Image (tube, rainbow, N blue to C red):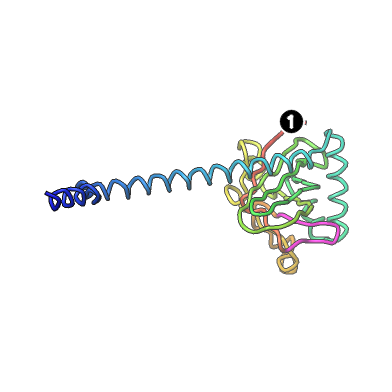
Amino acid sequence: MHMVSASMGKAWDDPLPDAPGQGLKNHREDEDMNAIRRTFHKLMLVAAASLSLAAFASNAVAATAEELNEDAAQALRVLYKGNSLAEDLGKRARAVLVFPKIIKAGLILGGSYGEGVLKKDGKSVAYYNSVSASWGWQAGAESYGYVVFLMSDKAVQYLDESKGWEIGVGPSVVVVNEGVAKNLSTSTLKEDAYAFIFDQQGLMASLSIEGTKISRINR
């Protein structure tokens, strides 16, 4: 009788075997939870990037159209003073987009923001903002400006009619750095637009505006 009790006790202590398919079910549940975690992390990254861009916008916005006009005129003077090719392009362009101050900052998530002016025949005719987001290691902040010379009617029309121009889509844009400038002249111009990225020290070869979104704003 004692032996029977011991055997029954051992039987109750042993874990029950998994039901058929239970292991596969648990595996799928783990995969679902991991997918949920990954989605949550992505949403958090997007939210953080949005907050970063909002912070840039609050620091980079000019208060009035008059301030933007003055800043754009000063930016063109700085660019033309150090680059005769840019000045020649300005004379030939159908229109000129001037972003006098872009603020770029971030750590793991980053982005840039600035506001600028579209000029035709030397007059300010519209106002735009420039927005970009970036991922990966990046530390600190920097400020720069850029100018896009629209050389064709097609490029001007695209900017006027689009709800937002993403650089790299639509009209072709060549970013002019020191190397490109040496091999470019007004007689070899073939692209829809040419962009110059610069600061007080001159052209900046390390920056790109690929993927930047340019959208019209009210001022």
Q: In this view, does 81 lie to the left or right of 151?
A: right
Please provide percent x and percent y for residue 109: 64, 51
Badge 1 density bin: few <14, some 14–19, many ≥20, Cα 10 Å: few
Please provide percent x and percent y for residue 218: 74, 30
Residue at 43% over, 48% down:
34
Please provide percent x and percent y for residue 45: 58, 46
Residue 126 vs 10, above or below: the answer is above
- Indicate yes or no whether the magenta region holds residue 60: no
Q: Is residue 66 left or right of residue 211?
A: right
Q: Mark 1 sits on what residue?
A: 218
Q: In which quarter of the image is the C terminus?
A: top right
Q: What residue type is labelled 1?
A: Asn
Q: Between residue 205 and residue 16, name the one nearer to us.
A: 16
Q: Between residue 108 and residue 70, name the one nearer to us.
A: 108
Residue 214 vs 201, above or below: the answer is above
Dominant SS in magenta: strand
**Residue sitting at the far front:** 2
- Indicate yes or no whether the magenta region holds residue 199: yes
Magenta-tinted stretch: 195-205
